[in-house]
Image (cartoon, rainbow, N blue to C red):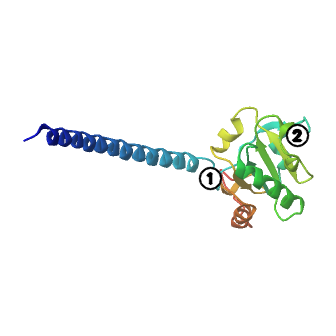
Amino acid sequence: MSWLPWILVGVLTGVVLWLLLALSGAARTVAELRAADEAAVRHLSGGIVPGSRAPGFQADAADESVFDARQTAGLRHLVLFADPACAACAMLVPGVVSEAAARRLPTVVVVSRGDLRAHPPAWRATDRAWLVSERGTEVSDAFGVDITPTVFVIDEGGAVVSRGPVQTVDEVADLVAQGAGVRIVGADGG
Protein backbone atom coordinates (compact mmCIF):
# COMPACT_ATOMS: atom_id res chain seq x y z
CA MET A 1 0.00 0.00 0.00
CA SER A 2 1.11 3.51 -0.78
CA TRP A 3 2.13 6.03 1.87
CA LEU A 4 -0.20 8.79 0.41
CA PRO A 5 -3.45 7.41 1.92
CA TRP A 6 -1.77 7.21 5.34
CA ILE A 7 -0.70 10.83 5.10
CA LEU A 8 -4.24 11.86 4.13
CA VAL A 9 -5.69 9.87 7.06
CA GLY A 10 -3.20 11.55 9.40
CA VAL A 11 -4.00 15.04 8.08
CA LEU A 12 -7.75 14.41 8.30
CA THR A 13 -7.37 13.08 11.84
CA GLY A 14 -5.41 16.21 12.78
CA VAL A 15 -8.05 18.47 11.23
CA VAL A 16 -10.86 16.63 13.06
CA LEU A 17 -8.99 16.89 16.38
CA TRP A 18 -8.34 20.59 15.78
CA LEU A 19 -12.05 21.17 15.00
CA LEU A 20 -13.09 19.30 18.15
CA LEU A 21 -10.76 21.43 20.25
CA ALA A 22 -12.04 24.60 18.57
CA LEU A 23 -15.64 23.59 19.23
CA SER A 24 -14.81 22.78 22.83
CA GLY A 25 -13.26 26.23 23.24
CA ALA A 26 -16.28 27.88 21.60
CA ALA A 27 -18.66 26.01 23.90
CA ARG A 28 -16.60 27.10 26.89
CA THR A 29 -16.64 30.72 25.64
CA VAL A 30 -20.42 30.63 25.17
CA ALA A 31 -20.80 29.24 28.70
CA GLU A 32 -18.57 32.03 30.05
CA LEU A 33 -20.60 34.67 28.20
CA ARG A 34 -23.85 33.27 29.58
CA ALA A 35 -22.42 33.30 33.10
CA ALA A 36 -21.18 36.87 32.64
CA ASP A 37 -24.59 37.95 31.29
CA GLU A 38 -26.34 36.32 34.26
CA ALA A 39 -23.92 38.06 36.62
CA ALA A 40 -24.70 41.42 34.97
CA VAL A 41 -28.43 40.82 35.38
CA ARG A 42 -27.93 39.79 39.02
CA HIS A 43 -25.89 42.98 39.58
CA LEU A 44 -28.59 45.15 38.06
CA SER A 45 -31.33 43.37 40.01
CA GLY A 46 -29.22 43.93 43.13
CA GLY A 47 -29.62 47.72 42.81
CA ILE A 48 -32.28 49.97 44.27
CA VAL A 49 -35.59 48.12 44.10
CA PRO A 50 -39.15 49.40 44.40
CA GLY A 51 -39.93 50.14 48.02
CA SER A 52 -36.40 51.39 48.74
CA ARG A 53 -35.65 54.99 49.56
CA ALA A 54 -33.96 56.76 46.66
CA PRO A 55 -30.46 57.83 47.67
CA GLY A 56 -29.76 61.50 48.15
CA PHE A 57 -27.07 62.96 45.94
CA GLN A 58 -25.47 66.12 44.66
CA ALA A 59 -24.21 66.62 41.12
CA ASP A 60 -23.02 69.41 38.86
CA ALA A 61 -25.93 71.06 37.05
CA ALA A 62 -25.93 72.37 33.48
CA ASP A 63 -26.24 75.97 34.73
CA GLU A 64 -22.94 75.47 36.63
CA SER A 65 -24.71 75.29 40.00
CA VAL A 66 -24.83 72.23 42.22
CA PHE A 67 -28.00 70.15 41.97
CA ASP A 68 -29.18 68.54 45.20
CA ALA A 69 -31.71 65.70 45.06
CA ARG A 70 -33.59 67.47 47.85
CA GLN A 71 -34.78 69.89 45.15
CA THR A 72 -37.21 67.16 44.07
CA ALA A 73 -38.58 66.59 47.59
CA GLY A 74 -42.35 66.26 47.52
CA LEU A 75 -42.43 65.70 43.74
CA ARG A 76 -43.10 62.46 41.91
CA HIS A 77 -40.17 62.46 39.50
CA LEU A 78 -37.90 60.40 37.29
CA VAL A 79 -34.18 59.85 37.67
CA LEU A 80 -32.92 58.91 34.20
CA PHE A 81 -29.34 57.66 33.81
CA ALA A 82 -28.01 58.42 30.34
CA ASP A 83 -24.72 58.76 28.52
CA PRO A 84 -24.34 61.02 25.46
CA ALA A 85 -22.17 58.34 23.80
CA CYS A 86 -25.06 55.83 24.09
CA ALA A 87 -27.14 55.72 20.87
CA ALA A 88 -30.31 54.68 22.73
CA CYS A 89 -29.81 57.57 25.18
CA ALA A 90 -29.32 60.06 22.35
CA MET A 91 -32.72 59.07 20.98
CA LEU A 92 -34.50 58.72 24.34
CA VAL A 93 -33.48 61.75 26.42
CA PRO A 94 -34.88 64.50 24.13
CA GLY A 95 -38.25 62.71 24.04
CA VAL A 96 -38.39 62.28 27.82
CA VAL A 97 -37.39 65.93 28.42
CA SER A 98 -40.04 67.05 25.89
CA GLU A 99 -42.74 64.84 27.46
CA ALA A 100 -41.86 66.15 30.93
CA ALA A 101 -42.05 69.75 29.66
CA ALA A 102 -45.49 68.97 28.20
CA ARG A 103 -46.50 67.45 31.58
CA ARG A 104 -47.14 64.01 30.07
CA LEU A 105 -44.31 62.61 32.21
CA PRO A 106 -43.20 63.64 35.71
CA THR A 107 -40.34 66.03 36.28
CA VAL A 108 -37.07 64.37 35.24
CA VAL A 109 -33.49 64.50 36.49
CA VAL A 110 -31.14 63.31 33.73
CA VAL A 111 -27.96 61.99 35.35
CA SER A 112 -25.05 61.87 32.92
CA ARG A 113 -21.27 62.17 32.92
CA GLY A 114 -18.76 64.56 31.50
CA ASP A 115 -18.90 68.19 30.45
CA LEU A 116 -22.56 69.19 30.32
CA ARG A 117 -21.82 71.96 27.81
CA ALA A 118 -20.90 69.22 25.32
CA HIS A 119 -24.26 67.45 25.71
CA PRO A 120 -26.86 67.88 22.95
CA PRO A 121 -29.05 70.99 23.34
CA ALA A 122 -32.19 68.81 23.51
CA TRP A 123 -30.89 67.41 26.82
CA ARG A 124 -30.83 70.87 28.40
CA ALA A 125 -32.78 71.75 31.49
CA THR A 126 -36.33 73.07 31.35
CA ASP A 127 -38.62 74.08 34.20
CA ARG A 128 -39.46 70.34 34.55
CA ALA A 129 -36.09 68.79 33.73
CA TRP A 130 -32.60 68.99 35.17
CA LEU A 131 -29.45 67.85 33.39
CA VAL A 132 -26.77 66.94 35.92
CA SER A 133 -23.36 65.32 35.71
CA GLU A 134 -22.12 62.95 38.37
CA ARG A 135 -18.53 63.63 39.31
CA GLY A 136 -17.48 59.98 39.02
CA THR A 137 -19.81 57.04 39.36
CA GLU A 138 -21.10 57.83 42.85
CA VAL A 139 -24.73 58.43 41.80
CA SER A 140 -24.81 55.39 39.47
CA ASP A 141 -23.26 53.29 42.23
CA ALA A 142 -25.76 54.54 44.83
CA PHE A 143 -28.66 53.56 42.56
CA GLY A 144 -26.99 50.30 41.45
CA VAL A 145 -27.01 51.32 37.77
CA ASP A 146 -24.57 49.73 35.36
CA ILE A 147 -26.34 50.23 32.03
CA THR A 148 -27.85 53.23 30.30
CA PRO A 149 -30.51 54.27 29.74
CA THR A 150 -32.11 53.25 33.04
CA VAL A 151 -34.94 55.13 34.74
CA PHE A 152 -36.28 55.20 38.30
CA VAL A 153 -39.73 56.52 39.19
CA ILE A 154 -39.56 58.20 42.61
CA ASP A 155 -42.69 59.01 44.62
CA GLU A 156 -43.47 62.17 46.55
CA GLY A 157 -41.94 60.68 49.70
CA GLY A 158 -38.63 59.82 48.03
CA ALA A 159 -39.19 56.08 47.50
CA VAL A 160 -38.61 54.12 44.30
CA VAL A 161 -41.97 52.90 42.95
CA SER A 162 -40.72 51.39 39.67
CA ARG A 163 -37.51 51.15 37.68
CA GLY A 164 -35.82 49.52 34.75
CA PRO A 165 -33.65 49.77 31.69
CA VAL A 166 -35.56 51.55 28.90
CA GLN A 167 -35.16 52.24 25.20
CA THR A 168 -38.23 54.33 24.31
CA VAL A 169 -40.42 57.07 25.76
CA ASP A 170 -43.28 54.54 25.74
CA GLU A 171 -41.27 52.24 28.02
CA VAL A 172 -40.67 55.18 30.38
CA ALA A 173 -44.42 55.95 30.31
CA ASP A 174 -45.14 52.27 31.12
CA LEU A 175 -42.87 52.44 34.19
CA VAL A 176 -44.58 55.67 35.26
CA ALA A 177 -47.97 53.94 34.84
CA GLN A 178 -46.74 50.95 36.90
CA GLY A 179 -45.93 53.33 39.73
CA ALA A 180 -49.05 55.51 39.32
CA GLY A 181 -50.86 55.92 42.59
CA VAL A 182 -48.23 53.88 44.44
CA ARG A 183 -46.93 55.53 47.58
CA ILE A 184 -44.43 53.56 49.63
CA VAL A 185 -44.82 53.97 53.37
CA GLY A 186 -42.61 52.28 55.91
CA ALA A 187 -39.07 51.99 57.14
CA ASP A 188 -37.43 52.12 53.73
CA GLY A 189 -39.97 54.11 51.77
CA GLY A 190 -40.79 57.02 54.00
Q: Position of residue 23 (x, y in %)?
A: 34, 46
Name the residue: 48% across, 44% down: 36
On residue 39, the disc is none
Q: Residue under label 2, please give it.
A: 62
Residue farthest to the top, as pictured: 136
Q: Give the residue type that dot 1 points to.
A: Val
Which image quarter: residue 84? top right
Q: Position of residue 154 (x, y in %)?
A: 74, 55
Disc 1 crowd rating (10 Å Cα; few below 14, some 14-19, many 20+) is some
Residue 190 in sight in this render:
no
Camera-nearest label, 2 or 1: 2
Q: Give the residue type that dot 2 points to.
A: Ala
Which image quarter: residue 111? top right
Which image quarter: residue 57? top right
Nearer to me, 160 or 85? 85
Disc 2 crowd rating (10 Å Cα; few below 14, some 14-19, many 20+) is some
Whether residues under marks 2 and 1 lie with C-beta atoms below 8 angstroms apart, the answer is no
Name the residue: 72% across, 61% down: 183
Q: Position of residue 122 (x, y in %)?
A: 87, 50
Residue 153 in sight in this render:
yes
- Assign a secondary structure to mark 1: loop
In this picture, is 136 found above or below 48? above
On residue 49, the disc is 1
